[in-house]
Amino acid sequence: MASYEESSPLLSNQPQPTSNENNTTKTQIPNSPDDTKQSPPPPVFHHQPVYGWTADGLPVMGEPVPRAQWESGLFACLGHNDEFCSSDIEVCLLGSVAPCVVYGSNVERLGSAPGTFANHCLPYTGLYLIGNSLFGWNCMAPWFSYPTRTAIRKKFNLQGNWEGMSKSCGGCCDMEEEQLEQAELACDFATHVCCHPCALCQEGREVRRRIPHPGFGAQAVAVMVAPGGQTMGRN
């Protein structure tokens, strides 16, 4: 038996116990050949994130959302042959005679908050009078009113002037999303400066088709009132 244990290859690698327990040595089992091979790191793909826009004008990650067209063109002052034709003529007349009313109404429909009309119509009227008094034309109010066009475009995910021009040219002016938004802001400002009454009317037609006025169209709500306390009497 002693010779068999000494000649056994399985027993030769086992550590021999020693008398000193404090000086015990730990044996390390060599790693298998499969453990020594390190798996290659996973591939890293560097790509640019794709941005889109929600209906509220907030950027989101993911696939780009296709933008919708405006309900009417910039110079379509008489509107379409639908139920909004009379309101389009009204918007056209107000934009020519009293643009502050159209601007205040547009902001009121977007904000749907009390006092929004007066808070925007009065400053617009002051800038309108200053521009006509000093320069002979309405050159001050567009600086105050053009952000409304940007808000409408973002809220309803509408196609801007720069993107429309790029598509008409076969995509020659395509750019990144952030650069595109900067170009659209410049186009919104240029539209209000060069074609201010037409821009206000187009925005007025758009919000009238998409947002009801906060002061009209309210439906009556039936309120159920609980009956009063009832008592049972004895005859």
Image: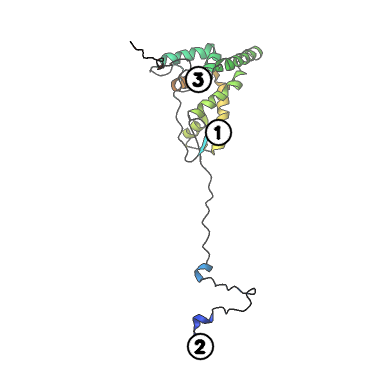
Q: Depth check: give the residue in front, 179 or 1.
A: 1
In percent of width and height, residue 177 lies at 54, 37
Tell me whether the residue at label 2 lies in contact with that at label 1, contact meaning CB atoms closer than 8 angstroms. no
- Image position of 16 with respect to 42: above or below: below
Query: 124 or 139, which lies in front?
Result: 124
From this viewpoint, which residue is outermost toward the bottom? 3
For residue 181, the mark is 1
- Going by the numbered disc 3, the residue's amino acid type is Arg
Q: Quarter of the image holding residue 145?
A: top right
Residue that label 2 marks: 2
Badge 1 local density, few (<14 within 10 Å), some, or many (20+)? some
In the drawing, what numbered circle is on residue 87? none
Applied colour scheme: rainbow
Residue at 60% from the left image edge and 21% from the top image edge: 144
Q: Residues within 10 Å of mark 2 (few under 14, many from 20)?
A: few
Amino acid carrying label 2: it is: Ala
Per the model, the C-alpha gap separating discs 3 and 1 is 24 Å
- Callout 2 touching callout 3 (CB < 8 Å): no
Q: Quadrant of the C terminus?
A: top left
Residue 178 on image: x %, y %: 56, 37
At 47% from the left and 34% from the top, the residue drawn is 167
* Residue to which mark 3 is pinned: 109
Q: Position of residue 89 (x, y in %)?
A: 45, 13
Q: Are the two marked residues, 3 and 1, in contact with CB atoms closer than 8 angstroms? A: no
Tell me how many marks there are: 3
Return the disc, 2 or 3, that comes first in the chain's sequence.
2
Residues 138 and 121: in front is: 121
Disc 3 is placed on an element classified as helix
Q: Nearer the viewer, residue 4 or 109?
A: 4
Percent of width and height locating residue 27: 58, 74
| Sequence-earlier tag: 3 or 1 | 3
Question: Three-letter amino acid code at disc 1?
Answer: Glu
